[in-house]
Image: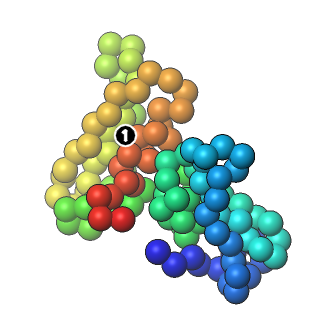
Amino acid sequence: MTLKPCRVCGESELLGHTFGFGDPRTFGVRCSRCGHEIATTESAQEAVWLWNNDGSDDAMKPCPFCNGDVELRDLLDGGDESYMIHCNRCHMNFRKFVWNAIGKRKVIGEWNRRVNE
């Protein structure tokens, strides 16, 4: 994956790299000019994807089956928090139960993970 220019300063040459932020399980991209950075604990590929999508932790990749737009829906099941990602084109659903405050980011991270990347 190639990196887009920095959305803060526009730097495109020697833009940045993936690295561990003092923790080998954390990956990120940092602009070599202004120092703007994006970090994640998912993977180096996820860090690049977040960088290229304006750093939004809520940005979701399109449906892997039909390339359609998807939406995140909050569900409540007996007091447990769960989420469903629904494709608006082929109506495929991806449902995930979570039990902690970072659950939403984890569900989106799992959705955005692709086998071939």
Determine whether 45 is above or below 52 in the image.
above
* Position of the C terminus by quadrant: bottom left
* Residue at image coords 44%, 47%: 109
Determine whether 30 is above or below 14 in the image.
above
Q: Left of 116 or right of it: where is 12?
A: right
* Residue 36 sits in quarter: bottom right
Q: How are the colours assigned in the image?
A: rainbow
* Residue at image coords 70%, 82%: 14
Question: Where is residue 64 shown, x and y percent of the image?
Answer: 25, 61
* Residue behind mark 1: 73
Residue closest to the far bottom = 13
* Residue at image coords 54%, 65%: 48
Q: Amino acid at mark 1?
A: Arg
Residue closest to the far front = 24
* Residue at image coords 36%, 35%: 83
Check disc 1: other Cα within 10 Å, few if <14, some if 14-19, many if 20+: few
Label count reads: 1
